[in-house]
Amino acid sequence: MHKVIAVGSTILVSLGLAAFFPPSPASGQPLPKAKGKGDPKKKGGPGGELRKAYDLLRRLRADEGAAGRPEERLRDWTDRAAGLYRDGLKALNEGDTFRAREYGTAAHDLARAVDHARNGARFDRPDPDLPAPSDDFGLEDTRERARRDLYRAYDRLQEADSWRAVPSAEFYNKAASDLYSAARRDLEAGRDERGGELARAAEAMTHVPEHLAHLGEGERREELRPAPPPPPERPDPKAKGGEPRDRGDRGLPPPLPGR
């Protein structure tokens, strides 16, 4: 008898919790999984790129339901990334692994930009109940990483003309430029955490039109496109023999023209 009562009580409690925490509504159309063609474990394979995009988009859309309605611009970027993912999945199902890989990579890069931009918004205000440690415990590392990522975004934006022929390139280049300028302003103001996230969002955004440009080249090949050479290492402003970059603007790359 006691077991019956205990089971009944457990069911009632579960029902009560379900009422307080209903499942989050899905954002837009459900995302289908990539399956069937392509080896998801193969580095750089179309299945792998689509899987990365799928996993990150699932997390972004789930967080939307838990945290409430996001900024309209971030929602638009998430929807665009989901559309690129679906295009990639369609290409994979049609056996076009080149286009599937490029769409999947573009979708993942755009989703990364959303993720970093949203993280930056979370660093908008300091937390008075969580004081930062002193400079001896890593704050300089946070700023140095942010400066390095801002330089990467700046260098990528200088190459934007290479894929300007893509119809949507102007949209993504402008979004990347806006993120870069916002990141630079944050670093000038000492908001290193927020600035770093926005710098990483800008750099990720610049990759979207590049992969869409690859699609317009009409290539159909299975081998991977050779990776571009890594950017040259910039001298450490503090290192001996390296020319310091700090010339009154705390070593940041220059602002973009017209901003």
Image (cartoon, rainbow, N blue to C red):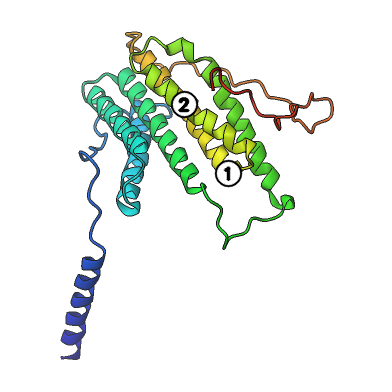
Outermost right residue? 240
Q: Nearer the viewer, residue 187 or 44?
A: 187
Q: Quadrant of the N terminus?
A: bottom left
Where is residue 6 shown, x and y percent of the image?
A: 21, 84
Q: Residue at x 36, y 41 (%)?
A: 71
Q: Amino acid at mark 1?
A: Glu
- Which numbered tag is attached to residue 176? 2
Q: Is residue 16 left or right of residue 219?
A: left
Where is residue 29 shown, x and y percent of the image?
A: 20, 38
Where is residue 217 shown, x and y percent of the image?
A: 35, 8
Residue 89 visible in the shown view: yes
- Which numbered tag is attached to residue 193? 1
Q: Is residue 88 left or right of residue 224?
A: left
Q: Quadrant of residue 13?
A: bottom left
Mark 1, other Cα within 10 Å: few <14 / some 14–19 / many ≥20: many
Outermost front residue? 258
Where is residue 213 shown, x and y percent of the image?
A: 38, 14
Gap in Å between the C-alphas at discs 2 and 1?
18 Å
Residue 131 position (above or below residue 96): below
- Which numbered tag is attached to residue 256? none
Q: Amino acid at mark 2?
A: Ala
Q: Quadrant of the C terminus?
A: top right
